Image: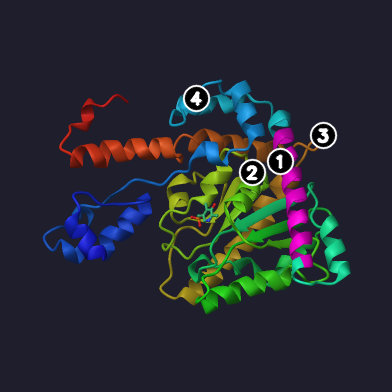
Amino acid sequence: MTVLAFKMSRYANGVSCLHGRVTRRAWQALWPHHREDEVPVGHITNGVHVRTWLAPAMQELYNRHVGADWGENLPDPKMWARIDSVFDAELWETHRTLKATLVSFVRREAEAQRRRNNHSEELIEAAKTTLDADVLTIGFARRFATYKRGNLLFTDMDRLRRLLLDPQRPMQLIFSGKAHPDDEPGKELLRTVYQSSLLPDLRARIVFVEDYDINVARHLVQGVDVWLNTPRRPQEASGTSGQKVLLNGGLNLSILDGWWAEAYDGLNGFAIGNGVCHVSTAEQDKRDCESLYHVLETEVVPLYYDQDEHGVPHGWVARIKRAIRTLGWRFNTDRMVRDYVRECYLPSAGVNSCAMPR
Ligand SMILES: *Cc1c(COP(=O)(O)O)cnc(C)c1O
């Protein structure tokens, strides 16, 4: 089908810079007279529809500080630079409120699903006090396809326990997602996460939300502190859920794959690994896993809990602002559709796209 599509199309592109490169390498044989970098496959990186995913409270914050017309100028970098004029305390307070909303949502979901699954009255009751809005909150929600490695954080349970149960600087996890009904290894990953969420010592710090859909996704991306993504590079063509947390004030913690490989600049989120792949997947998993724990222990947790006397983590908020300023204008559908019109649709129709206004 891919060959047929290439041969029948006037234009082809990858959905992130890295995906374009991987595609040129994978299909070079179709263009035997071209060097790999001359294979006619470019890239247009995916974006998300901001008004679908952005929390109303953040929309209001942008109305106040970025300008009432921010929604019409999403791909404008100069506009997003105005985020630096927002007081840290105001941005943090808005985020804290959204996180509290997420905690209430997850408690309600956990209670309902435990009732539905005939769990003990004790476990159902426990759902009402699970999670804590003051605790560093990591979200992970996507299809449980094996290459996305939804269980990577659960590789070393002792190390995970130390992170979750630290008396001064704890961490909590909200997971969601479905596996394909025929994907047995995928279902096995999901089982690991789900069973961990019911362990007596961890269940106040890990929740698995069933029936992942757009509504669950919307709650998660609007309230988490950190969005975790652990694909086996370079298999994530783009990934978009991490883009949904950007303008909501969440930070990405991700393998340098898909969109994150071109987005991360060292200070606008966190990276797992250094973008180097190993021929052995077992070895790559081991290295990525070590890096994930290391980054959590030495960067993410310390930065989050470095808070002033009012509970505002200024270093953390600086990263949020940097993410909004450096990434907000790029990873939205307005920019994406503009790129498709300019680079694909108009040239394919024989129209000179240089005549289009910027
Ligand atoms: C955004 C979204 C996805 C895609 O997320 P990825 O990061 O690309 O895996 C899948 N399902 C739902 C419900 C979503 O909201």
Of labels 1 and 3, earlier in sequence is: 1
Crowding near pointer 1: few (<14 within 10 Å), some, many (20+)? Answer: many
> Does the magenta segment cover residue 95?
yes
Crowding near pointer 4: few (<14 within 10 Å), some, many (20+)? Answer: some
Q: Nearer the viewer, residue 133 or 52?
A: 52
Instruction: Name the secondary structure under disc 4.
Output: helix
Residue linked to disc 3: 310
Of labels 2 and 4, earlier in sequence is: 4
Q: Main secondary structure of the magenta part?
A: helix
Q: Are marks 1 and 2 in contact (CB under 8 Å)?
A: yes
**Where in the figure is residue 1, as x and y percent of width and height?**
26, 66
Residue 79 disc label: 4
Residue 222 disc label: 2
**Where in the figure is residue 177, as x and y percent of width and height?**
59, 62
Q: Considering only vertical position in the picture, is 300 above or below 276? A: above
Amino acid type assigned to the residue bearing label 4 in the image:
Met
Residue positioned 13% across, 63% down in the render: 32
**Where in the figure is residue 274, as x and y percent of width and height?**
48, 58
Mark pair 3, 4: CA separation? 29 Å
Magenta residues, as a range? 92-115
Residue linked to disc 1: 98
Amino acid type assigned to the residue bearing label 2 in the image:
Gln
Taking the image as shown, residue 43 lies to the left or right of residue 187, namely: left
Mark pair 1, 2: CA separation? 6 Å
Q: Nearer the viewer, residue 277 or 43?
A: 43
Taking the image as shown, residue 63 lies to the left or right of residue 19, namely: right
Mark pair 1, 4: CA separation? 24 Å
Q: Is residue 224 visible from the viewing direction of this image?
A: yes
Instruction: Name the secondary structure under disc 2.
Output: helix
Q: Is residue 205 visible from the viewing direction of this image?
A: no
Mark pair 3, 2: CA separation? 23 Å
